[in-house]
Structures are given as C-alpha cells and as structure tokens.
Image (spheres, rainbow, N blue to C red):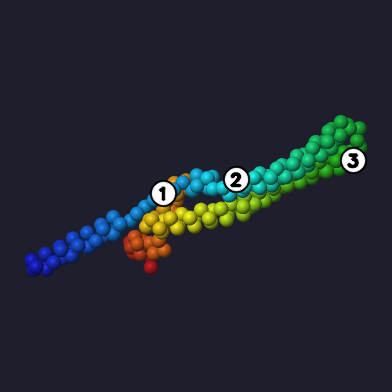
Amino acid sequence: MRKLSFSLLTVTVLLAGSTHKLIAQQKIGCINSNELITLMPENDSAIKVIEKRQLEFVKQSEELQVEFNKKYAVFTSSMDTLPLLIRNAKQEELGNMSTSIDNFNKAADQELNNYRQETYQPILEKAQNAISEVANEEGFTYIIDIATRSLIFFPEEAPLNIMEAVKTKLGIE
C-alpha cells in the first residue's frame, strides 16, 4: 500500500512539474498596434486619401446647406405676403431639403467609414503578418496588443485551452 501511495505521489509530482514546465515555456510579448500603424509609411498616404474624400463630402454638404439657407432666407422674407398654398408648398420644400441634407450627411459618414476600412485593410494585414512572422521567428506563444487589450497572435493549437473542462464543470455536452 505504501509503495502504491509513494508511486502515486511520485507521478503527481512529475505531472505537476511537467505542467509547470509547460507553463514556464510560454513566451508572451506585447505590441501597441496603433503606434505601429502610425509609424508605417503607408499610414501617411492613407490619411491623405481619406482626408481628400472627407473634404469632398464636406464641400458637397456645405453647398447643399448654402442652397438651403438661401431658399430659407427668401422664404422668411416673403412669408407674410405669400398665399397659404404657396407658403405650405415652400415649407414642405424646405423640410424636404433639410431631410435630404441630413440623409446626405449620414450616408457620407457611412461611406467615409467604409472607405477608411477599405483603405486601412491592406495596412492592417501587413502589420498583422509582420507581427505573426516576428512572433514565430522569436518563438513567442502569444502576443497581446496593448492598444486594444486583445490577443493578436496565438498558436493554432492553444496549449492551455480549458474549454472542455469548463463545459464539463457547467454540465454542457
């Protein structure tokens, strides 16, 4: 019985030591991806093309607003002398113009966001590829992005995945 207890104790110590060794072999690095992106030469040209597109939208929005303001000024200056039917038609026209301007601005914001994502996608991919290459070359197990506080590199087979144990603990099959 003592031999069995001693054997179990020995196996337990060896397994605990192996697990500790496994954990100790993990190499974790970190990077600030936002800082990396701002340092990449592609970032400057991306900023320029995005600002150019944004300026086009702002210019168009301002032109629409100037046109609205002119019509509004004409309407308010002659409102008292207009027949009710014409006054109502002008009010409706101004309301429609205002709605149209709001819709344009919302659509421009959405399109600019999409354009920004399209423009930065290759830059982000290049940065991610470089991070993965360095992580593999340097033997990192995990890389944490301190800008987003997220894991941006990890091995394909996570060595410490506890999903099955947690599912069992929760009674999930």
Where does the image place residue 110, in percent across and percent down from the top left?
66, 50
Identity of the amino acid at label 2? Answer: Asp
Residue, disc 2: 44
Measured in 3D between alpha carbons, the distance from the residue under mark 2 to the one under mark 1, in whole angstroms, is 24 Å
Considering the image in quadrants, where does the N terminus appear? bottom left
Judge left or right: residue 74 versus residue 48. right
Mark 2 or 3, nearer chain start? 2
Judge left or right: residue 129 versus residue 170. right
Disc 2 packing (10 Å; few <14; some 14–19; many ≥20): few
Q: Secondary structure at mark 3?
A: helix
Instruction: Give the label, 3 or 1, closer to the camera.
Output: 1
Cβ–Cβ below 8 Å for labels 2 and 1?
no
Q: Which mark is on residue 86?
A: 3
Residue, disc 1: 30
Residue drawn at (70%, 43%), measured in percent from left and top?
A: 55
Measured in 3D between alpha carbons, the distance from the residue under mark 2 to the one under mark 3, in whole angstroms, is 53 Å
Judge left or right: residue 157 versus residue 69. left
Report whether residue 95 is seen: no
Cβ–Cβ below 8 Å for labels 2 and 3?
no
Residue drawn at (53%, 56%), measured in percent from left and top?
A: 125
Mark 2 or 1, nearer chain start? 1
Where does the image place residue 146, in percent across and percent down from the top left?
44, 46
